[in-house]
Image (cartoon, grey):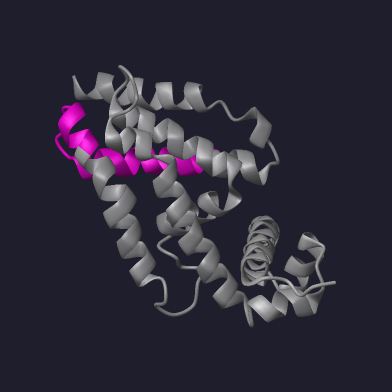
Amino acid sequence: MSPRTKEQNDAIREMRMSQIMQAAAEVYLEKGMQLEIRDVAVQAELGYGTVYHYYKNKQMLLEDLLWDALNQAESAVIPALTGDVGNRLKAESFSRLLLRKCIQDPSVFILLKSVADNFHHFPGNRFSKLFGEFQERVYLPFVEMIRQEIDSKSPEKTANLIFGSLVGYATLNIHHNMRNEIDVDGIVDMIFSGIQSRER
């Protein structure tokens, strides 16, 4: 049998890291910061040594998980950022896309909840750069949509209200194992109809 090529090794590495991060997200939902590398190995159905080969500690793993979640969140809302959303408000479409991604990918939910909590569960100041990138790549574009589309006296307060509502709604459903019951369209319609009637 011939040795694997560099491309094959890279593909295996990518697959393993994805498997580990998906498992870490599920374990984090259950255990929070009590997560241990062993728990992730069990969830991923990998040996402890395999996971440890990629991540020496849970802080490194969680950091990678959240940076990847930021990329996933930004990719999910690109149609709203580029205006490819039909006749809906871009801010409304952005909210739907973000909530859907939050339900599909637990790491995106963990990122949004961590941002809302100002990363207070994480030790030290290691997530300040991530927070800044989230602001730049996701939050501020959303605020700008609100500024342009909704007659709001304070676009930042309106953005915070919407983010808080989305994260709170997702939290209640995800932590009660009701992901399949989340009504994305219903909750976003309710939030935006409430905001628009208040702003009139």
* Above or below 48: residue 28: above
* Residue stretch rendered in magenta on the structure: 145-169
Relative to residue 105, is residue 136 drawn left or right?
left
* Above or below 188: residue 33: below
Residue 17 covered by magenta stretch: no
Residue at (56% x, 76% y) in the render: 59
Residue at (67% x, 65% y) in the render: 8
Residue 33 % position (x, y): 62, 69
Q: Nearer the viewer, residue 4 or 95?
A: 4
Residue at (59% x, 71% y) in the render: 61
Residue 132 visible within the image: yes
Residue 19 % position (x, y): 69, 59
Relative to residue 187, is residue 13 drawn left or right?
right
Q: Quadrant of the C terminus?
A: top left
Q: Nearer the viewer, residue 106 or 10?
A: 10
Residue 156 covered by magenta stretch: yes
Q: Nearer the viewer, residue 15 or 41?
A: 15
Residue 174 % position (x, y): 63, 43
- Residue 75: quarter of image: top left
Residue at (47% x, 50% y) in the render: 72
Relative to residue 138, is residue 27 drawn left or right?
right
* Above or below 98: residue 198: above
Residue 152 visible within the image: no
> Of helix, strand and loop, which mostly describes the magenta segment?
helix
